[in-house]
Image (spheres, coloured by chain):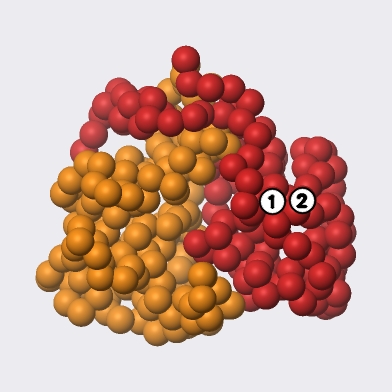
Chain colours: A red, B orange
Amino acid sequence: MKTTQELTELVRESLSGGTVGQFRPCAFFDDRLDCIRVIARECSVVETRVNGLLTILEANYPRGDRECAGFTIKGARYFCQKYGLSLATPIKISDLLDAVLQAAPDVVVRTIIDHVARPLVKEARIEQVEPADVSGTVPQEAP
Amino acid sequence: MVRIAGRTGPYFEVLAAPSPDDPSQTVKVGVRNDTFQRYRKHGLVTSIAQYFGIVQEGLAETQHLFRGLERPLMHDADMDADERVLVYAWRPYCDYEWSGGPWDGNIIPREPPPNRVFVVLVKEEKPNEFGVYGSIEKWNWIMEDSRLKDAPVEWDVRYGKKLWSKPR
């Protein structure tokens, strides 16, 4: 088993191999797993499946009782196509969440969207999903 | 430690993982440069820390292996890509978070909260010159199932089928 120092060195070494950004809340399309990831906090999370469309990310070590760190919209290609959202252009988060409610209008999903997801993206100031075919804005280069 | 090779073709690193056919055998799985680059770009350093601390160290300790995600997954022209995902699950005894900036931060070891297991999603690859069976796409914690120790909660709803469980 590696020591904490060895692990830290491995992480730093891996960061030297490309462009590295300072974390900021973000939303992006994961092409290979066909999902949209919305991440408000950079931390260890436990993923809780709500249904086949929605998964919630909760902090494993919350600053209070529970702390939502993000969520995932699964099956994004089909979902976005069905609800007229283009992954090739920025998608407004509010439009995305409206579409989720349209797709799964049950009480549990509505509660999560209205009382967890919307406040989360508002507080984290996540306004849109990065386009799928754009490398994205990177705040800083590796020194 | 299950590391087989460092940078190889499109892979940042290649590891040995238990085979889907027989847990006593291994297959090569690789984490793609693209995957690491996405974590780097967004500053998701905790995920990178978990890769080195949990995935690299623990994949060989997998307790259960599942095939198929019970949700739509399209990739390229493959409409049934969900069926080509393997889910390795086990309970690690340590978790890791990254504290601080990418360049001046440090790994913080943590005792995982109870009733959680770790999963690694591996997507089967088309046969390639690197002999890599599948690409490591994602890794994260999930709540533990109350009926099957060290397995993700509702594994029978989340995944297509269980391929094997190692005897205890």
| Whether residue B30 is situated above or below residue B67 in the rendered picture | above
* Chain hosting mark 2: A
Tell me the element at label 2. loop
Mark before the other along the chain sequence, 2 or 1: 2
* Residue B45 falls left or right of residue A77: left
Residue A133, position in %: x, y? 62, 52
Label 2 – label 1 distance at C-alpha: 5 Å
Look at the image and tell me in which quarter the C terminus of chain B lies.
Answer: bottom left
Residue A75 lies in quadrant: bottom right
Q: In this view, which residue lies farthest toward the left?
A: B24
Q: Name the kind of residue labelled 2 in the image.
A: Pro
Q: Which residue is mark 2?
A: A90
Q: Nearer the viewer, residue B98 or A20?
A: A20
* Residue B20 falls left or right of residue B135: left
Tell me the element at label 1. loop
Residue visible at 20% across and 79% down in the picture? B21
| Whether residue B20 is situated above or below residue B48 in the rendered picture | below
Q: Give the class, few, some or many, for how many residues have Cα within 10 Å of label 1's Cα (few <14, many ≥20).
A: some
Q: Name the kind of residue labelled 1 in the image.
A: Pro
Residue visible at 42% across and 39% down in the picture? B48
Q: Which residue is mark 1?
A: A131
Residue A125 lies in quadrant: top right
